[in-house]
Image (cartoon, rainbow, N blue to C red):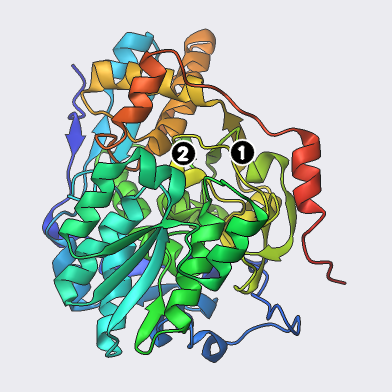
Amino acid sequence: MSEIPYKIYLSENEIPSAWYNVRADMKKKPAPLLNPGTGEPLKAEDLYPIFCEELSKQEMNNDDQWIDIPGEVLDFYKMYRPSPLVRAYCLEKALGTPAHIYYKFEGNNTSGSHKLNSAIAQAYYAKKQGLKGVTTETGAGQWGTALSMATAYFGLDCQVYMVKVSYEQKPFRREVMRTYGATVTPSPSMNTNVGRKINEQFPGTDGSLGCAISEAVEAATTQEGYRYVLGSVLNQVLLHQSVIGLETKAALDKIGVKADMIIGCAGGGSNLGGLISPFVGEMLRGENQYEIIAVEPASCPSFTRGSFVYDFCDTGRVCPLAKMYTLGSNFMPAPNHAGGLRYHGMSTILSQLYDDGFMKATSVKQTDVFAAAEQFARVEGILPAPESSHAIKVAIDEALKCKETGEAKNIVFGLTGTGYFDLVAYQKYNDGVMDDYIPTDDDIAASLAQCPKLG
């Protein structure tokens, strides 16, 4: 038995007291958000009608390396943080690999995922600004669940537009949100102008995160005292999620281990960005080198088959333009079961880092993901979320490569949350009726052709 324990815990006093802003160390900053009407770069105050003022400032902050975590947010973090870094001894043994596998487990709170790290911060700033409530979208439901918990804590109203396919596949996740006081609407709905337009354009659509974002933004901007909050993609969200990577790095340092490879699932970028931020910071400063792998679904392959261009962040085209790896804002992903990864674009931070060669990306098929999820569950005792299982799949693949070469690499991956509300998906996999839809080149080309043409 190794001297390294199964679980490496930090103390409560070792929870980060400040978020790390990786943009401060990026020599090539993410491209600015653009006004979709004028094409001009946006300033923080231009975002005030949509986002909370302090969050708008964080969104535009490319200079401050560290941003203090407010005391009320830090007190809330202490209810479930620090989260454990786990050595996957049982998985290593089952694979027969010399690799050392570690995972950062973010599912040890009622929301079941890492999303609470940013939800509580955004709810805090909304309360501090004196708002009545917030609106948002959710894919698999983890972000909506986290935000409903955070708004209940601060006494705010919460309106959630949930991607229709997930609303139907995950009724119990929906009920958790309602238990915490949120109103949950399947998207696209007939409640908003943009929802009605999308339903007319795509009859019978299962929806997408891009659709739900459009509806949530419209709902926020048409109600007095409301602002829109987002669970992924934005710079401010990756900032808040940096607590994941900071704790991971501190736990590895505590046991004297340097990661060789860091793997995370990639949908909009919140988990991956948070996990890798301090490691990428060392790479940007020339202090260390790591192999970083983003894993996305083959049904929605923004990095691996998208283009690095300016595009709308939402299907309804009401949000600012962001330069990112995208499949086109009109891209409608297949109704796969990793609802949190069904987004047409990617974080501008991660897009720039990927384009600059600081990370690699790969895509994996849905059935292969669930095979890896069940293999992991049977030996490690945690039922993983479908999103997290994308990282598990590639971590297993890389560990098996080590078995062939004899290398004892230190592999770290993010286990973003649990899959106990995803049992319909597991049922379909176990019944052999899960499919692997992969978009054609023509599908993607047609969607990308509709991206705005900028000079």
Asked whether the viewer can see residue 196, the reply is yes
Q: Amino acid at mark 1?
A: Ala
Could you say where residue 267 lies in the image, as x and y percent from the top left? 51, 47
Q: Nearer the viewer, residue 317 or 194?
A: 194
| Residue underneath mark 1 | 361
Label 1 sits on a secondary structure element that is strand
Residue at 70%, 54% (x, y): give it.
328
State the mark number for residue 377: none
Q: Does 403 sit above or below residue 410?
A: above
Residue at 33%, 21% (x, y): give it.
427
Could you say where residue 213 lies in the image, as x and y percent from the top left? 50, 64
Q: Is residue 394 left or right of residue 246?
A: right
Q: Nearer the viewer, residue 294 or 178?
A: 178
Asked whether the viewer can see residue 99, the reply is no
How far, Cα to Cα, is label 2 from label 1? 12 Å
Q: Nearer the viewer, mark 2 or mark 1?
A: 1
Could you say where residue 217 lies in the image, as x and y percent from the top left? 49, 73
Residue at 24%, 43% (x, y): give it.
172
Q: Is residue 209 left or right of residue 32?
A: left
